[in-house]
Image (cartoon, helix red, strand yellow):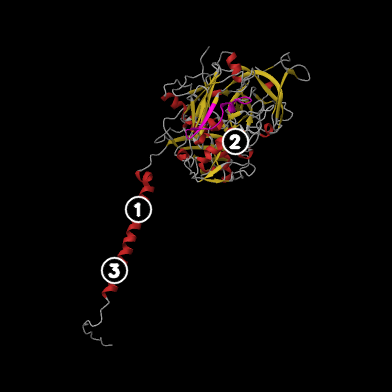
């Protein structure tokens, strides 16, 4: 079998929780877990996420047809079909990109009606239908065309069957993403189709960035297992989903008092990389919740961000995510082969959205059945390999925001570059070379050799109404939303105009909780801007990226690194000085008072009155 790798940047969007073929979709809501009676919901997020809770799915770019028509698809390991809106869709929402137009693709072919599919009313073309628990649905016809991943992969275009939507309802109608990329087990799955063509090995990997940092990657094809990766058997006959053999959960080194069979109910323990949180059967959830509470008695329990849910939340844990392990216990998941996956607090907590420095349990009770469902929160900063050929899933703790560097450090062969080493071809203001970092308009490629401190770029706009003046606050919020950043990170440095031509100068800084911007995030921001994936309202007209520059993280001076310690020492010294002065005055006053007292009978020198 040909060994080829496909490494894709996952691009940021917001809005819904997507799902597999049996799933729930809901905007940041906790999905009810029932599909047929068990539901596997998928939440994938954006490569540059500000926080796992705020951003509700991950997407990647997929091109279909000749010439290519590009779409943003939600990556879903629980779904077995890939679909996009069709040009003749009778009921489709307004999404990120234009609908697919089959008549404009010279390589498009309808999948003709046959004995293995349901046919349309005319009896000419195969159809598909996907319904979801909260009553959203996707219906359409099946087509066959060339699919490719554009500049993000060396994989040549391949023919694949996909769905062309004619009707959307519910969250599928209102979501911003164009459609779904199905990576589940099934003959229509994109992975299955690529494997059958011997284009990739029967394996793929996903890696999600940590809380408040983001970053990540998807790899189609096999990679050498990094040293330290732990595995669990996955039985495709046990359930149609990606399952593992979970036997025990340890909290702070102590196993929960549960029988191992509690994790083997219904579909067993299912890993759906897209599900937002984790869901345990009732007994397991109560034991886990109580164990966490008993290990954080120093923290105050507070109300959750949503009064409709009885979240288990703790206040006073602090802002620094890296120090959460000093407050919250380590959790271990023990597999059937005795191998152990260790979870840090970011793997079972999410940030409280209303109380700074507070966190809530991202593990909930599965009230609908006995399936144990492990969602994306469990595998933050974890490379997960879905080795379908050998029926096993691998887990390797790493920094997903810098996956390529981590793989190189372990001696593993790294995938092909994400983006070709080309440069910006849009009209540009002649820039001078930057004194440090990357020269302006020099595209960074798959990685940057330094920590990014600031990203600066200029955008030119051609606006029809020359008298229109933008609202700068709204402008910053729009750019921040499109790039998947916090508004506080995006700064409009300057805005100039000449007629209907506008030039905006921008700077993006690290989040408050981070010292630098991850390299993956920096590459992704420039890629989105360069390839015109930033979607702005029509009143902003069209834009061009005319110049960009990436500066490294500035080395902090001795004073910047130690000013808090110096301030503390100075405060103590000042306090001691003032205390000493106060004590000296008290001592002197007492001495003067004792010196002015004379016993009775003591001779006192005669004092002469001064003349008036």
Residue drawn at (45%, 22%), measured in percent from left and top? 226
Q: In this image, 292 relative to 306: left or right? A: left
Q: Is residue 584 something one can see in this rendering?
A: yes
**Disc nearest the viewer among 3 and 1:** 3
Question: How many discs mark residues in the rendered view?
Answer: 3
Q: Nearer the viewer, residue 249 or 345?
A: 249
Q: Are marks 3 and 1 in contact (CB under 8 Å)?
A: no
Q: In this image, 69 relative to 551: left or right? A: right
Quadrant of residue 55 in the image? top right
Q: Is residue 425 something one can see in this rendering?
A: no
Residue picked out by circle 3: 588
**Residue at the extreme right of the image, as rendered:** 121
Query: Taking 260 as reference, is 14 above or below it?
Result: below
Q: Nearer the viewer, residue 283 or 171?
A: 283
Q: Nearer the viewer, residue 506 or 12?
A: 12
Residue picked out by circle 2: 364
Query: Which numbered circle lies on residue 20?
Result: none
Residue picked out by circle 1: 570
Query: Which region shows up in magenta?
Result: 247-268
Real-space Cα separation, disc 3 to disc 1, in angstroms: 27 Å
Residue 414: x, y in percent? 46, 22
Residue 3: x, y in percent? 51, 15
Secondary structure of the residue carrying tag 2 is: strand
Secondary structure of the residue carrying tag 3 is: helix
Q: Are marks 2 and 3 in contact (CB under 8 Å)?
A: no
**Disc nearest the viewer among 2 and 3:** 2
Real-space Cα separation, disc 2 to disc 1, in angstroms: 48 Å
**Disc nearest the viewer among 2 and 1:** 2
Real-space Cα separation, disc 2 to disc 3, in angstroms: 68 Å
């Amino acid at each position: 079998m040909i060994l080829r790798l496909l490494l894709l940047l996952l691009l940021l969007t917001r809005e819904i929780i997507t799902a597999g073929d049996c799933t729930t979709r809901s905007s940041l809501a906790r999905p009810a877990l029932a599909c047929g009676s068990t539901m596997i919901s998928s939440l994938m997020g954006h490569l540059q996420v500000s926080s796992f809770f705020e951003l509700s799915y991950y997407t990647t770019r997929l091109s279909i047809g000749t010439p290519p028509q590009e779409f943003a698809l939600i990556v879903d390991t629980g779904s077995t079909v890939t679909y996009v809106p069709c040009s003749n869709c009778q009921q489709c929402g307004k999404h990120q990109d234009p609908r697919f137009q089959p008549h404009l693709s010279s390589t498009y072919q309808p999948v003709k009606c046959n004995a293995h599919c349901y046919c349309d009313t005319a009896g000419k073309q195969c159809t598909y239908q996907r319904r979801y628990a909260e009553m959203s649905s996707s219906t359409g016809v099946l087509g066959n065309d060339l699919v490719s991943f554009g500049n993000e992969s060396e994989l040549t275009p391949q023919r694949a069957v996909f769905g062309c939507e004619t009707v959307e309802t519910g969250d599928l109608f209102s979501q911003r993403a164009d459609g779904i990329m199905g990576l589940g087990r099934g003959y229509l799955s994109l992975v299955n189709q690529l494997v059958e063509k011997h284009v990739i090995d029967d394996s793929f990997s996903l890696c999600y960035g940590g809380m408040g940092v983001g970053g990540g990657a998807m790899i189609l094809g096999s990679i050498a297992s990094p040293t330290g990766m732990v595995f669990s058997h996955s039985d495709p006959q046990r359930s149609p989903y990606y399952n593992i053999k979970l036997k025990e959960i340890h909290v702070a080194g102590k196993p929960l008092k549960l029988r191992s069979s509690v994790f083997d109910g219904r579909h067993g323990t299912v890993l759906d990389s897209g599900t937002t949180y984790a869901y345990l059967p009732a007994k397991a959830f109560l034991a886990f919740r109580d164990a966490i509470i008993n290990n954080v008695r120093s923290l105050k329990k507070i109300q959750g961000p949503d009064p409709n849910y009885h979240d288990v939340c703790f206040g006073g844990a602090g802002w620094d995510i890296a120090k959460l392990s000093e407050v919250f216990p380590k959790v271990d998941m023990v597999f059937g082969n005795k191998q152990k996956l260790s979870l840090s607090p970011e793997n079972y907590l999410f940030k409280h959205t209303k109380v700074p420095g507070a966190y809530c349990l991202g593990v909930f009770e599965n009230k609908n059945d006995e399936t144990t469902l492990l969602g994306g929160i469990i595998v933050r900063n974890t490379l997960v390999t879905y080795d379908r050929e050998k029926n096993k899933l691998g887990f390797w703790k790493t920094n997903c925001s810098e996956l390529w560097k981590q793989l190189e450090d372990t001696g593993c062969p790294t995938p092909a570059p994400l983006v070709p080493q080309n440069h910006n071809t849009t009209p540009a203001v002649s820039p001078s070379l930057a004194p440090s970092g990357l020269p302006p308009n020099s595209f960074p490629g798959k990685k940057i050799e330094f920590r990014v401190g600031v990203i600066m770029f200029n955008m030119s706009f051609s606006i029809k109404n020359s008298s229109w003046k933008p609202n700068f606050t709204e402008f910053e919020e729009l750019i921040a939303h499109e790039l998947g950043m916090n508004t506080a990170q995006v700064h409009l440095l300057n805005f100039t105009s000449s007629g209907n031509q506008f030039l905006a100068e921008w700077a993006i800084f690290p989040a408050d909780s981070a010292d630098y911007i991850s390299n993956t995030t920096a590459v992704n921001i420039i890629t989105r801007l360069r390839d015109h994936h930033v979607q702005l309202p029509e009143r902003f007209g069209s834009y061009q990226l005319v110049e960009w520059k990436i500066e490294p993280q500035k080395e902090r001076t001795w004073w910047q690194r130690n000013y808090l310690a110096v301030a503390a020492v100075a405060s103590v010294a000042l306090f001691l000085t003032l205390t000493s002065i106060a004590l000296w005055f008290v001592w002197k006053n007492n001495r003067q008072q004792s010196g002015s007292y004379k016993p009775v009978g003591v001779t006192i020198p005669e004092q002469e009155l001064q003349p008036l």
